[in-house]
Image: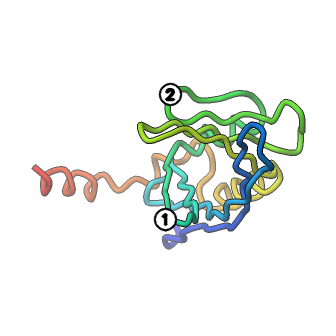
Amino acid sequence: MAENTIITAGTTFQLLVPGIAPAPVEAELQYNPEDPYAVAVLFHTGQGKVEWMFARDLLADGLLTPSGEGDIMVRPAADDPERVLLELNAPTGFAILSAEAEHIAEFLDLTYDVVQPGEEDQWIDFDRELAKLVASS
């Protein structure tokens, strides 16, 4: 395993609200090989940063076909093949955000340069994870 390199890429999502022009939302995509199955999106809002974490596979699959269920769904935009939609559902609200599919794909490619798909389990430090479980009980 190589040294831990956190991959970060900035992008702009468009918040989609019916009847209103899309509003830009600055965000950072993050990938940490210490949590090799997950990606994070940090949205910069007027209230500070809001972080959503979900499976890297969900983000990748959503570039090609509707993926996910429940709190997070990712799918190609029906009206624009160059965009991908991220649907977020939380107890406090629901949002649909649109991003350039190419930006998401470039970010995923950077993560694959660090941890190849199917090799995530090789990056998990089971002793460290077990120590965390024991310490929290």
- The vertical placement of 19 against 30, above or below, is above
Residue type highlighted by circle 1: Gln
Apparent side of residue 36 relative to residue 87 in the rendered image (left or right): left
The residue under the point 71% across, 42% down is 17
Q: Which of 63/44 is in front? A: 44
The residue under the point 75% across, 28% down is 65
Question: Are the residues at dot 1 and dot 2 in contact (C-beta closer than 8 Å)?
Answer: no
Mark before the other along the chain sequence, 1 or 2: 1
The residue under the point 72% across, 33% down is 75
Q: Which of 52/126 is in front? A: 52
Furthest-front residue in view?
A: 19
Residue pointed to by mark 2: 70
Residue type highlighted by circle 2: Gly
Q: Quadrant of residue 88?
A: top right
Residue 110: percent from left, percent from top: 69, 61
Residue 34: percent from left, percent from top: 43, 60
The label on residue 47 is 1
The label on residue 39 is none
Q: Quadrant of residue 59?
A: top right
Q: Which of 134/118 is in front? A: 134
Q: Crowding at label 2, few (<14), some or many (≥20) Cα neighbours within 10 Å?
A: few
- The vertical placement of 111 against 5, above or below, is above
Q: Secondary structure at mark 1?
A: loop
Measure the alpha-carbon separation of dots 1 and 2.
Answer: 24 Å
Residue 101: percent from left, percent from top: 80, 48
Residue 53: percent from left, percent from top: 49, 49
The residue under the point 60% across, 67% down is 7
Q: Secondary structure at mark 2?
A: loop
